[in-house]
Image (spheres, coloured by chain):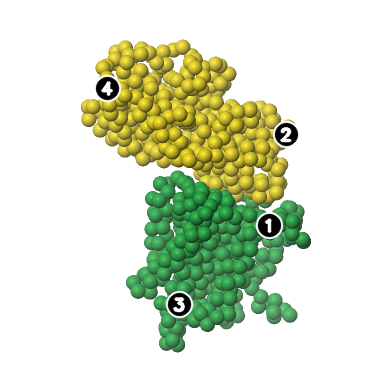
Chain colours: A yellow, B green
Amino acid sequence: MINKFTATALTALVVALPAQAQNFDDPAEFAKQKDMLGATANGPAETPWLQHYGDVMADTSSFKKDGPHTICFSNAGVNNPWRVVGWNTMQAEVEQHDAIADFVVTDAEGSDDKQIADIEDLLAGGTCDALIVSPNTTAALTPAVEKACEQLPVIVFDRGVNTDCPVTFIKPVGGYGFGIQSGEFIAANAPEGSDILMLRILPGVDVLETRYSAAKRILEDAGLNIVGAEFTDGDRAKTKAIVEDYIQRGNQLGAVWMDAGATSVAAIEAFEDMGLDVPIVTGEDQQDFLQKWQEIGMNTIAPTYPTYQWRTPILAALKVLDGEAIPGPEWNLPQPAITNDNLADFVNSAMPPLHYAACGCEGMPGYPERWGGK
Amino acid sequence: MMDRLKQMNPVFLVLLLLFVAIAILSPYFLQPTGYMNFLKRAAPIAILAVGQLYVINSGGFDLSAGALVTLTVIGSSILLDGEASATWWVILAMLGVGVTVGTVNALVVSWLRVPSIIATLGMMITLSGIALTWSGGAPRGYLPENFRFFGRFLIKDLPLIKILPVAVIVMIVVCALLWWLMHRTNYGKRLIAMGDNPKAALLAGVPLTQTRIVAFAMSSISAVIAGILLGGFAGVSTDVGVGLELQAITAAVIGGAQLLGGRGTVGATIAGALVLQAMFTLLNILGFPKPVRDVVQGLILISAVVIAGYRRRRSGG
């Protein structure tokens, strides 16, 4: 009896501790993002980077200023292909506006400390009319952003901060939405009760943790058998070896769920090289995955974390300095999923393998060369 | 008969037992796709282990092999960037890098009198740093299909064995050449003499520096070839080579190679690599996660050295 009580208390403690730190499995946020995926976004559908959900707007009349402007940007880093595509897209957006006289950029190279110093330097320089921040990590950058808010309008995008002082926080629907899109597809299309392997890049990153918790919830509710959840470090060789290992153990995999698409092709190759039919392997909007999907005719889905969100902060900053109201304190952009129905719209063999198709960058200055295309 | 059995290297018996265990647990391995995929996955580590054996037989270690594998994959992908027509010169360039790395390792050991374990540790850190700087920490570039051919392509519809991975052919050819050089040439005799007793070898007229250069170059070239296979197997990856040098040393030791030189055969080293891979496969079928495999690899390494020492004392060799 005592044992049972202790065990319950311990379990409660273990469950409560991470929940206090940061909750990656929040039913309320799950429901909110699920609703957003089902809702229609405001604004014209051909420019999704300007669309938003809901009607709550932020008043910016106090920030109105005569141009031309100096816009400053503190970037967390350009250390993965997703950020490379986004950064190229943002630079192309800047070139399109005569109202931007100067675009001052710092690159934190993935370091919290450097980004905090970068923001201090930008503020001390005194030339910025607006500051855009793409935080490296949420908690560490919060004080620096709060300090910046006292001096000028701040726009945060991609990863968030724990303060509502910025004019707006721009992001797509979110990680739960990503997990919901791929989870629901597998639940509807995988053979009933089949084995599912979940592959993740690494633990502890909020946007990846929420993708996982949302998909896991849906797969379990659908009665599918999750045989494993493994970390790949985003490494193709490791991914391929893990999938081969699971196949060799005799699992009848009905689907491989991926929390990001960079190694989806490696997972597909594991089945191909063992002479097996390729089941559902989810991915993202990287060209290599989309081209493979089209080439071998898979039935799958690619949720996106669209890189066109890198256009929005520039457009938002200009609106703020014009005193025009923008969606805030949260600006949620649509988060499309690529399916067999619209796959052809996104495949483009002229673009490099790790180009993210949902960049909204076609027709921008320097397309396609700026993004490495031919 | 019993004497001959006693003299036989126990690694072959262990390998047989492991295969039987795997076949009982997973009949998939009795089919051609099963054992051919096994050999395909074992090919890079077998090649690396035989290359490593050259350095071990010379009386040293080559810890830089794994980092060179990573550098090969990353360097090739950046140089190629999906350009199929450049594959051949990139492969040649990478083999050139291998020869250079091996030569530098050997010269640091010979001329500067740095123990090989430190010299190659330094080289390992240097090569990792170069790979990281070059790639910016994230996989860039792309490996075209004709580069990936060696590590990935399967020859299908063959009689009897049905499929034959190109990686297995590469393994057989490379290992055969390295076997010939080690066991059928004067160079091989000089190498083993040098590892056994460098002073005696020097007095007998063995050119130590030259012999060491070839040994380290063989290890580095085998690392480049393993890198080409691993890159072909799964594409670009930034930590593909991490820990491979230790697997290669483990495989050579399981095969009965004597650390600090002078004793070790190519055949037994290949068997050692297969034992290691078979052990990983068995643990996987039993459902053990990767960290457990690392523990087992460590235990095998220690047991192999202990058993080899015990056998040597008993046989008076």
- Is A235 drawn above or below residue B96 in the view shown? above
C-alpha span from label 1 to label 2: 32 Å
Q: Residue A79 or A97: which is nearer the viewer? A: A97
- Residue A37 location, x and y as percent? 56, 21
Q: Name the residue under label 2.
A: A191
Q: Nearer the viewer, residue A189 or A211?
A: A189
Considering only vertical position in the picture, is B199 above or below B286? below
Same subunit, labels 4 and 1: the answer reads no
Labels 3, 1: front one:
1
Please state which amino acid type lies under the numbered disc 3: Thr
Numbered disc 3: what chain? B
Identify the element where label 3 is drawn. helix
Q: Do the residues labelled 3 and 2 touch (CB within 8 Å)?
A: no
Residue highlighted by disc 1: B155
Quadrant assignment for the N terminus of chain A: top right
- Mark before the other along the chain sequence, 3 or 1: 1
Distance CA(mark 3)–CA(mark 1): 38 Å
Instruction: Specify the subunit that label 2 lies on.
Output: A
Label 4 – label 1 distance at C-alpha: 64 Å
Point 45% across, 83% down: residue: B206
Label 4 sits on residue:
A68
